[in-house]
Amino acid sequence: MLSIGDLARDTGVKVPTIRYYEQMGLMAAAGRSDGNQRRYEPSDRERLAFIKHARGLGFSIDEIRELLELNAHPDQPCAHADEIAERQLAAVREKIAKLRLLEDELARIVNHPHGDQVRDCYVIRSLANHALCEHDH
C-alpha cells in the first residue's frame, strides 16, 4: 500500500493533481487507513503513470477517460484507441503548423531593420499595427 505522498514521489505527479484525477473520475477514490490517510495499490501507480503519460502527449481528460475504459477491456479491438490517437496527432500537427507561422512572423519582426530608439522599433510598431504582419496569427 502506498500513501499519496509515496504515489506522488513514485510517479512525479503532484498530490493536488492526484486528488484532482480522483475528483474527475480518472482514479478511483483511494482506500483509507485507520488514521483516514489515503492508501493506494500498485495498480493505482500504474494507472496514474498511464494518465501522466497520456497528459504529456496532450490527450484531454475525456480522451484519457475513454482510453482508460478501453484499457480495462484488453480483448476488445484497438480501432477506437487508434482513432483517439489519430485525432490527437492531427491536433498536434495543426498546432505545429500554427507555431511555424508564428515563428516565421516573429523572426521577420525581430530581423526587420529599425532604429535604436523605441519610436523607431519595428517590434513595437508591428505589435501596434497588425497590418504590418505578413501572416494572420
Image: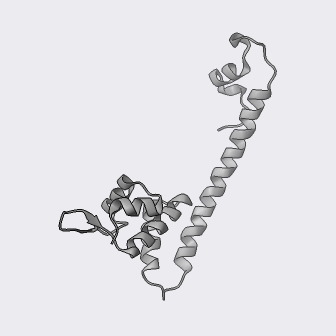
Q: In this orientation, does residue 47 appear?
A: yes
Left or right side of 85 for 35: left
Q: Residue at x 34, y 61 (%)?
A: 4
Residue 44 in percent (x, y) is at 38, 71
Q: Nearer the viewer, residue 136 or 34?
A: 34
Left or right side of 8 for 22: left
Q: Quadrant of the C terminus?
A: top right
Q: In this orientation, does residue 58 appear?
A: no
Q: Note whether 125 is above or below 69 in the view shown.
A: above
Name which quarter of the figure residue 106 lies in: top right
Residue 134 in percent (x, y) is at 74, 33
Q: Quadrant of the N terminus?
A: bottom left
Residue 79 in percent (x, y) is at 56, 79
Q: Note whether 88 is above or below 44 in the view shown.
A: above
Q: Residue at x 71, y 37 (%)?
A: 135
Which colouring convention does the figure follow?
Answer: one colour
